[in-house]
Amino acid sequence: MPASSRNGLINLDFSLVPTAARSVAGAFAGDPSLDYAFADPGKKANLHYIMRYYLKLDILSGGSCIATSPDCEGVASWCLSDIHSSWWAKLKAGWLTLPYYGGWHFVRYSQKEDRFFETMKARYAPERYVYLALLAVAPMYQRKGYGRKLLTELVATLEASKLPCYLETQNMKNVNMYRGFGFELVESTAYPPGTGCEIHIMVRPAAA
């Protein structure tokens, strides 16, 4: 059984990654950027396999990965900005499966996307900070308080560490939710540039 966190949340481990990955994939299934990420539309059905890789990588790299229960209705992952994933961690998490599940176009797209967001982080969060890499709630559990439960845990971590927090969200409806937890909208843009795929950059200042 995964170790318990505050508020009944649990720390995600490898045994729950497949369940968590399906919740995350379901939450992002309607993201319009997927049309640009996958050259082959049929590969979108493999999104949960790709999310397995990213969740495993977060765990192996020392990030905080939590879920609302073993059913993984909601999943969140955050890490300190000075944590960097090694190539060994990437290989162990399954990097070599990405071309198979997503295609080489997806791999190249992801690398370009990472460089774009690194520029944004350097612009708006130049000091040491916590990066909220992921917060997702499976579609059937949305609007039932799971996201707020995960954010409450994040804020408790931020208050204790007295560090700022940086995030990106693709959904304008999420902006008001994050604002309720002290985040400020610092820029709205699009990725890929020039498309209708909106990206909202938000920062929560460090606690006094």
Image (cartoon, rainbow, N blue to C red):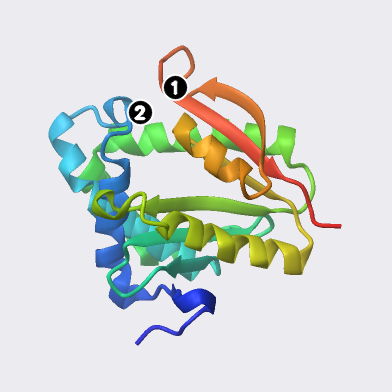
Compared with 123, 79 (above or below) is below
- For the view shown, which residue lies furthest in the front direction? 144
Compared with 160, 39 (above or below) is above
Badge 2 amino acid: Ser
Residue 177's tag is none
- For the view shown, which residue lies furthest in the right direction? 208
Which residue is disc 2 drawn over?
33
Q: Secondary structure at mark 1?
A: loop
Pointer 2 local density, CA inside 10 Å: few below 14, some 14–19, many at least 20: some
Residue drawn at (77%, 42%) of the image: 126
Q: Which of 80/182 is in front?
A: 182
Badge 1 amino acid: Pro
Residue 196 % position (x, y):
41, 16
Q: Can I make out residue 88 in this image?
A: no
Pointer 1 local density, CA inside 10 Å: few below 14, some 14–19, many at least 20: some
Q: Is 40 left, or right, of 206 in this rendering? A: left
Residue drawn at (17%, 30%) of the image: 41
Split into 4 quadrants, where in the image is the N terminus?
Answer: bottom left
Which residue is disc 1 drawn over?
192
Sequence-wise, the earlier of marks 2 and 1 is 2
Compared with 185, 149 (above or below) is below
Residue 109 % position (x, y):
39, 32
- For the view shown, which residue lies furthest in the left direction? 42
